[in-house]
Amino acid sequence: MADTRVTLSGITLDNPVIPASGTFGFGQEFQDYYDINVLGTFSFKGTTREPRLGNPTPRIAETACGMLNAVGLQNPGVEHVISHELAELATFFHKPVMANVNGFSIEEYAYVAQRLARQPQVGWLEVNVSCPNVHGGGMAFGLAPESAAAVTRAVRAVTDKPLYIKLSPNVTDIVSIARACEDAGADGLCLINTLLGMRIDLRTRKPLLANRTGGLSGPAVFPVALRMVYQVSQAVRVPVIGMGGVASACDVVEMMLAGATAVQVGAQNLVNPCACREIIEDLPRVMERYNIQTLRDITGGAWK
Amino acid sequence: MADTRVTLSGITLDNPVIPASGTFGFGQEFQDYYDINVLGTFSFKGTTREPRLGNPTPRIAETACGMLNAVGLQNPGVEHVISHELAELATFFHKPVMANVNGFSIEEYAYVAQRLARQPQVGWLEVNVSCPNVHGGGMAFGLAPESAAAVTRAVRAVTDKPLYIKLSPNVTDIVSIARACEDAGADGLCLINTLLGMRIDLRTRKPLLANRTGGLSGPAVFPVALRMVYQVSQAVRVPVIGMGGVASACDVVEMMLAGATAVQVGAQNLVNPCACREIIEDLPRVMERYNIQTLRDITGGAWK
Amino acid sequence: MKFTVQENKPLTATVYRMTLRGDTRALLRPGQFVQLQLPGFYLRRPFSVYDWSPAERGCMTLVYKTVGRGTEAMTRIPVGATLDALVGLGNGFITDDIPAAAAARAPLLIGGGVGVPPLYGLCRRLLLQGQRPAAVLGFNTREEVILRADFEALGIPVTVATVDGSEGVKGFVADAVETLAAPLDYVYTCGPEPMLRAVHALCGRKGVGGQFSFEERMGCGFGACMGCTCETVTGGKRICKEGPVLVWEEILWQTRG
Amino acid sequence: MKFTVQENKPLTATVYRMTLRGDTRALLRPGQFVQLQLPGFYLRRPFSVYDWSPAERGCMTLVYKTVGRGTEAMTRIPVGATLDALVGLGNGFITDDIPAAAAARAPLLIGGGVGVPPLYGLCRRLLLQGQRPAAVLGFNTREEVILRADFEALGIPVTVATVDGSEGVKGFVADAVETLAAPLDYVYTCGPEPMLRAVHALCGRKGVGGQFSFEERMGCGFGACMGCTCETVTGGKRICKEGPVLVWEEILWQTRG
Ligand SMILES: Cc1cc2nc3c(=O)[nH]c(=O)nc-3n(C[C@H](O)[C@H](O)[C@H](O)COP(=O)(O)OP(=O)(O)OC[C@H]3O[C@@H](n4cnc5c(N)ncnc54)[C@H](O)[C@@H]3O)c2cc1C
Ligand SMILES: Cc1cc2nc3c(=O)[nH]c(=O)nc-3n(C[C@H](O)[C@H](O)[C@H](O)COP(=O)(O)OP(=O)(O)OC[C@H]3O[C@@H](n4cnc5c(N)ncnc54)[C@H](O)[C@@H]3O)c2cc1C
Ligand SMILES: Cc1cc2nc3c(=O)[nH]c(=O)nc-3n(C[C@H](O)[C@H](O)[C@H](O)COP(=O)(O)O)c2cc1C
Ligand SMILES: Cc1cc2nc3c(=O)[nH]c(=O)nc-3n(C[C@H](O)[C@H](O)[C@H](O)COP(=O)(O)O)c2cc1C
Ligand code: FES
Ligand code: FES
């Protein structure tokens, strides 16, 4: 029997497949398509202290084998997330969930992290220092080792729950940023967030997105994500959750060979609401084809 | 009549379509498919002082809507390029050509640039400080403003021919590097070179490329390239040659709206040897559809 | 959900009709839409349903206009091809839960361009409910007029307006509505945003309610990505989930007066 | 160049034959290959030509094995579909310009797995030139044996070897070659790299010349990208342009002795 279990900071998941933040809402919409308890876990929509409407529309554009989004962290604010979304989630999802923490200041990160960490449903904090779609926060923190470490330290100070920092790929040296987060107390790293991109409407001669630029994700970015996971996972001792363009069980295996302990699936959930269920169903077949008995053993299999 | 002409540092091209270095050899192979004199110009294969065999194979891998290459600057060395390739080229291509200059030291860049600049066929120098597939040179120079500027200054010192610096997208802040090159005397900028990526073979559990990582190009990278062209072209006064995933006449127009004065086409030449001819033929139709009489007028049309 | 293309043929130079066979049971209301996966494109395309027969082996018809690479490629999909679609998306036009809508005896359907198709299924539904709808359909020019005969075959009053006057009343739909003899009762409308704005203002001036179907760029189409959220009087609404149909009162073009 | 699929059918569980109709005039030599564009994939796929009729409305046949996503998708391409291919790529097997090849009266064709197909067109060419080729075809197991009858129908001696001994001689092709009664004259070979190495060593030991067809990951297939360059005795050679066929002497596995 194929053993698909993986362990993230002491919590064992049935499988490494985790829908990525911002592409799975708070799970509700997917419950219409399948029982989401088959998932390893999922990362819920990026949450801030105050409610946010996000950016003006259009917020979505298509690209070759991918998409741009400039949602800009629309969310009802951490208190509403706790009182409504997480309360509702508890009625149909029975596993620890990953909380995607956002902020526009170090204090806000710490505040939101502390509030979410106290919820018993929350298994891990995923601190997003890499959102390219908001100004004066988000990605800015993830572009340099010092600021990424500062956020890590501040959040570390308020919680003992497993702390994962989600890194931006829009940098010259992601390894130095990953190391700085590790040194500042991160229990793990998530990569990659979206690549900053753009499309222009030939008719109007204006950027397609109201926000002008947006974050690129989907299969197009997979090779960049894989390379970064390969580099970072060899340079740190903490687990890496790999993501960026994962769309099939083969991609999951490839990410894990590159060094990922678990794998997130983002944009693919949007084009196929059953993507994660299908990937989970396919995993044992793919493992058999490539002679894998115990999935967790292949993490880093491609390191030299 | 649609006017497709554009001007790069005083030399007027019939159209903005320029095959990108490394995807067009020295023109010969394409001459079998069409008369390459229809091109604006083309950029020939990256040239170094000594002959290079490049990296071991496999050097190519496929990705979603793109490809990885790790050719590693295979070329016969600058003297052979001058005595054989350019001599041969003169027999069938009658326009100024763009010389792609490479080096493993600042001295080598200057040497190769000086040798190539002396050739009357060479209209522009394109100095590649962004090749991700060689060690101890190439991309290393393009990752920081200081080193990119140092190469620019050294090459500037040896030639008066128009000098374009080709930038790497694998950086946190491409604008600062572009500005440094401009300040150091560049007449223009070319962007983007390839994004550093990777694929792993599930059967062997090893990287697909012998060089482990390679450069990602093709339609997958278009939105990233477009964003960088948009940012850089607004921040400098010199012309920008845009490239990265351009595959159609619509893409050419989109790149120009983002701020490109001319456009290079790379990987698409490999999957369709007639790509550039077809793009050039399509341009007037696309211009008509979007009400463009004079193509050069749309450069930067999407700047706010 | 897999569908088989039964028909894919041009109605005008740029508008096509595609009929798909498959499980349509998720479609509950006119004005709901589907997200169609087109081979070679990453995101799905949203299209309203013109009309459908609800069954496990049912049928649904889309009427679409070629505006970009996806819809152009769509015209080349052969009969017999299999396409994947998410069906029954969005709230659709509500004809029962909203008191004003349920009470309207002679609602006016106002469509513009490819906003016209979903009003056909709606019209059939209203007739079944015993209401007496009328339709005003607006186009740019005579060559672009679609579905006029379909509405006429339902036996309702149909007014066509063209911007250049080449068919029917000359002018915009909102202008054409002003010329109607019958008093305005309730409005259902779908079309380009300038038209929706004009109709919204008109409703405001006349003090009648209505439902407006919106378009927005979509990531998912089923409420997951927040890509399509628009601000309304009652907060952010996902056009794909709480829309595409919004009622007059919640739209942020405050023009009642 | 556009081609129409005439046939696409399985020969074994994993090997298919595809026949394409179109302009094949660029094909000049057996062992040349085509670069086939598969819908939904960025790079083209290289396939050797099994046999062809050279004409503006000619035919060519490929025999391919499913090894990955591209070839798996290829099995689902229906008859009648149009595919784009670059044809007449590479040098192919040379039967005239190379003196040893032209002089060989009884050249041996050694094929392994899907290296066998291009040897068929070669065999026909050699027979036309009045030579008397023989063939040794190697496979893993009985279920994977392909094209045996095709070669036999040409009236030449055919030896089949399978690694597990389930059909023909048990063992690797190079072993099977050693068991042949006829003396080695000249070799043409195509197959997996371990087989090529073994045959190369064998030629070295016996002091006979030969031509070896190689595989390499390709960007373009027509000499533009330098993606496929391999080092040889005479410098870097592009497998797609100066190859895929290399002669014994230029191969860098120095084993003559
Ligand atoms: C709820 C809803 C119902 C619709 N119903 C119909 C209908 O019945 N008939 C019809 O002809 N059209 C309809 N549209 C518009 C239709 O979705 C677009 O015309 C179509 O997506 C354009 O695709 P394209 O590839 O040709 O254009 P491109 O511009 O090449 O598409 C690029 C991307 O932009 C998106 N996009 C482009 N235009 C629109 C648009 N107007 N609205 C939403 N997304 C867009 C595409 O889906 C794609 O993701 C509807 C849109 C929505 C939101
Ligand atoms: C000159 C030449 C002639 C060939 N002739 C035949 C033939 O007659 N019959 C046959 O079955 N196969 C032949 N091959 C191998 C064939 O090209 C590959 O099996 C095929 O490309 C695999 O595609 P895929 O999408 O299924 O595999 P994937 O692994 O999914 O493909 C990913 C990428 O790798 C490339 N690739 C994978 N395997 C190979 C390979 N062995 N050689 C070159 N590129 C590869 C693909 O082209 C693609 O770009 C030939 C290869 C070469 C170079
Ligand atoms: C519509 C959309 C919204 C997103 N919102 C968030 C978010 O709120 N927080 C976050 O950390 N990442 C967010 N992301 C990034 C994804 O979680 C993921 O890192 C990225 O999309 C790469 O994975 P993919 O290629 O599988 O989509 C979002 C991505 C998309 C497409
Ligand atoms: C096979 C290959 C070889 C390349 N070699 C060079 C090179 O020698 N010098 C250089 O400046 N860029 C080189 N490039 C980069 C291209 O010129 C171009 O910048 C990049 O591929 C992005 O464009 P594209 O997406 O259109 O391919 C190479 C790209 C490819 C695909
Ligand atoms: S399109 Fe994703 S939420 Fe509406
Ligand atoms: S594959 Fe491009 S040169 Fe051989």
Image (spheres, coloured by chain):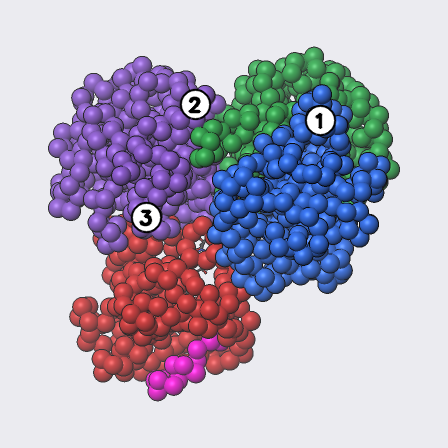
Chain colours: A green, B purple, C blue, D red
Magenta-tinted stretch: D145-157
Does residue B240 lie above or below B52 as drawn?
above
| Residue designated by label 3 | B278
Residue D97 relative to residue A46: left or right: left
In the rendered image, the quadrant that contains the N terminus of chain A is: bottom right
Image quadrant in which you'd find residue A112:
top right
Residue B113 on the magenta span: no
| Amino acid type at image mark 3 | Glu
In percent of width and height, residue D101 lies at 22, 72
In percent of width and height, residue B74 lies at 29, 42
Q: Are marks 2 and 1 in contact (CB under 8 Å)?
A: no
The residue at 68%/22% (across/down) is: C255
| Amino acid type at image mark 1 | Gly
How dense is the environment of label 1, judged by Cα within 10 Å: few (below 14), some, or many (20 and up)?
some
Image quadrant in which you'd find residue D115:
bottom left
The residue at 82%/49% (across/down) is: C129
Q: Residue furthest right?
A: A91
How dense is the environment of label 3, judged by Cα within 10 Å: few (below 14), some, or many (20 and up)?
some
Between the residue at mark 2 and the residue at mark 3, the CA separation in whole angstroms equals 28 Å
| Residue designated by label 2 | B303
Does residue D9 lie above or below B175 as drawn?
below
Between the residue at mark 2 and the residue at mark 1, the CA separation in whole angstroms equals 38 Å
Q: Nearer the viewer, residue C119 or A228?
A: C119
Label 3 lies in what chain?
B
| Residue designated by label 1 | C204
Does residue B179 lie above or below D19 as drawn?
above
Element type at marker 1? helix
How dense is the environment of label 2, judged by Cα within 10 Å: few (below 14), some, or many (20 and up)?
some
